[in-house]
Image: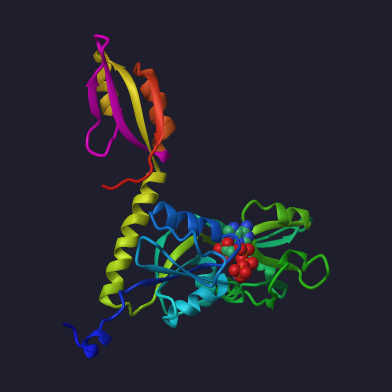
Amino acid sequence: MLEASSQNSVTPPVKLRLAIQKSGRLHDDSIRLLKECGIDISNGVNKLKADASNFPIEVYFLRDDDIPQYVEDAVADIGFVGENVVFEKNKKLIVGEKLGFGKCRLCIAIRKGEDYTGAGFLANKRIATSYPVLVRQFLNKNNINAEIHEISGSVEIAPGIGLADSICDLVSSGSTLFMNGLKEVETILESQAVLIQNENLSEAKKQLLSRLLFRIQAVKKAKNNKYILLNAPNDNLEKIISLLPGMKSPTVLPLAEPGWSSVHSVLNENEFWDIIEQLKEAGAQGILVIPIEKMIV
Ligand code: ATP
Ligand code: ZN
C-alpha cells in the first residue's frame, strides 16, 4: 500500500506550453497546423488556455506582440509568431522552424506621385511605423538619418494626414497601400510565422518538442508534394520513369490491358508542371494528381 507522503511526491506529467495568437491573422492557421499534426484543442479557443486531448501540450492564447516576451520568460515554452514580431522584439530565444503561413513583407512606402531614387530618398524624412527597431536597422545599414514616428496602428494613413512623409508597414497584396495613395519602394523583411523556443527547455520538454517538430515537418513536406498516378505505354516506360524523382523509385504495376503499366510517384510542387508536360509528351495518359496528407521520409 502507498503511504500518503509518497503519493504527494508524484509529479504531474510534463506538458509543452505553446503560445499562439488569440485572434487575428495567425490564429486560424496556427490551430489548423496543430490539427494537421493530429493535435485537437477544439474545446477551448475562447479561453485563455486550452489542453489538447491527445498530446501533452497546453495552448495559451495571447496577443502576438506579447508571445516573444512570454517565451523568453518561460511562461510559455514555445510559440508560433511572425518573424516580423520576433525580430522587432529581439528577445533572447531560439528561432526555429518556418511554419509556411502568415506570409507578408515589411515594406517602406512613399506617396504614389513621388520619384524614388534609392534609400537616400528617405534622408531627413519622417517615417511612420510600428516597427521602429527594424526600420532603424535598415536606415543604419544604409547610413541614412531619418526621423522615425512610432505608431501602433493604421500606419498607412499617416502621410495622408501629414503625420509622416513615408511609412514602413506589413504588406501582403499591396491593396491597402494603393487605396491610401502610396507605393511600395523597399522590402526590409520577408516574413512568415515561425516556431520560437525558450533557450532553457528541460530534456523532457525538448523531447516533446522534437515529437511536435517531426509532425510539423511531415505536414509541411506533404503540402509541398503531390502523389501522382499515370498510365504508361510499356514502350516508353523507361523514359517516363526517368522523369519521375519519387521518394525512392516509382512504383510500377502492370495494367490489365497488355502493353500498359500504372506508375505511381511523388512530385514536388516546384517542378510539378514541367514534369507533367514532359510526361504527356512521353505518352503518359490518365494522369491523376492527389494531395498528400502527411509525408514521413
Ligand atoms: P494582436 O491583437 O494579436 O496584436 P495584430 O493586430 O497585431 O493582432 P494581425 O493583423 O492579426 O495582428 O497580424 C498578425 C501577424 O500576421 C503579423 O504580425 C504578421 O506576422 C502576419 N501578417 C500576414 N499578413 C499580414 C498583413 N497583410 N498585414 C499584417 N500582418 C500580416
Ligand atoms: Zn499584434
Residue 131 to residue 219: above or below: below
Farthest residue in the left direction? 1
The residue drawn where x is 44% and y is 31% is 273
Up/down of 13 relative to 39, above or below: below
**Image: 149 above or below 113:** below
For this orientation, the residue located farthest to the bottom is 5
Residue in the picture at 34% in, 23% down: 230
Residue at the location (56% across, 73% down)?
Answer: 65
- Say whether residue 47 is left or right of residue 153: left
Residue 242 can be seen in this image: yes
The answer to if 249 sits in the magenta stretch is yes
Q: Answer whether residue 49 is magenta in the image.
A: no
- The answer to which quarter of the image holds residue 94 is bottom left
Residue 192 percent across, percent down from the top left = 50, 59
* 189 horizontally vs 215: left or right: right
Magenta segment: 243-270
Q: Nearer the viewer, residue 147 or 235?
A: 235
Q: Where does the image place residue 297, in percent across and percent down from the top left?
A: 26, 47
Q: Position of residue 14 (x, y in %)?
A: 31, 74
In front of the other: 71 or 165:
71
Q: Is 287 or 139 nearer to us in this picture?
A: 287
